Amino acid sequence: MGECTDLTAEDSSNLIEEIATSGNRQAFALLFRHFAPRLKAYLRRLGAGDTLAEELAQEVMLTVWRRAAQFDRRQAGASTWIFTIARNKRIDAIRRDRWPDIDPEDPALIPEPLQAADKTVEAGQREALLRKAVTTLPVEQSTLLRLSYFEDKSHSAIAEELNLPLGTVKSRLRLALARLRTMLEDVQ
């Protein structure tokens, strides 16, 4: 980050005020050479890795450049003001890591497109027809359909739950589906 220079508290405050009043780049360069290595070491002590500490130190110094006019030596010394900015930048970085920015383009956040009204009505009619057809099946077949398709249970779990052989569950489901298919084809 550059060589280290020694500045007094008075020198640092004067440099910040020069930056605020005239945008003095040489004053900023002196301030940067003095504080950047100290900021990086401080940020590392706060748990930032080398790369993050370097980035945050530069962000802090950029903030000093941009907000130099907000510095008031009567409220705090230059180093206190600068290191407070550094501490706040580190807290912001921790928050960003915990709660990353939401990507609005994330496919999981994009809602499904609305279905046309006629398609929604058709789907509702098909569902009503299917439910009515299921009620006309024998109880053992409608129970198997409900467990398999509405409760999403595996054939082996159904067989165990109803104390039936697995082959019986599969054949009754096939028979139930064939009957449903025939009933629904007759309706259409």
Image (cartoon, rainbow, N blue to C red):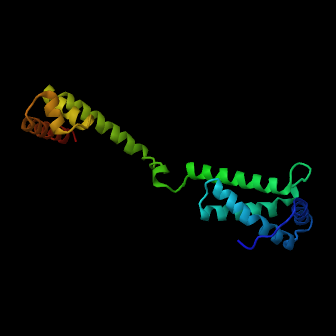
**Does 19 sit left or right of 130 as displayed?**
right
**Does 63 sit left or right of 75 as displayed?**
left
Pick the front one: 127 or 80: 80
Q: Residue at 18%, 42% (x, y): give it.
A: 185
Pick the front one: 81 or 144: 81
Q: Residue at 14%, 40% (x, y): give it.
A: 182
**Does 135 sit left or right of 101 as displayed?**
left
Residue 99 in sight? no
Residue 64 in sight? yes
Q: Position of residue 110 (x, y in %)?
A: 49, 51
**Does 54 sit left or right of 170 as displayed?**
right
Q: Position of residue 117 (x, y in %)?
A: 43, 43
Pick the front one: 83 or 71: 83
Q: Residue at 81%, 64% (x, y): give it.
A: 65
Q: Position of residue 183 (x, y in %)?
A: 17, 37
* On screen, residue 54 above or below 147: below
Q: Residue at 86%, 54% (x, y): give it.
A: 77
Image quadrant in which you'd find residue 54:
bottom right
Image quadrant in which you'd find residue 133:
top left
Pick the front one: 119 or 5: 5
Rendered-image quadrant of the N terminus: bottom right
Q: Position of residue 136 (x, y in %)?
A: 17, 28
* On screen, residue 165 above or below 29: above
Numbered marks: total: 0
Rendered-image quadrant of the C terminus: top left
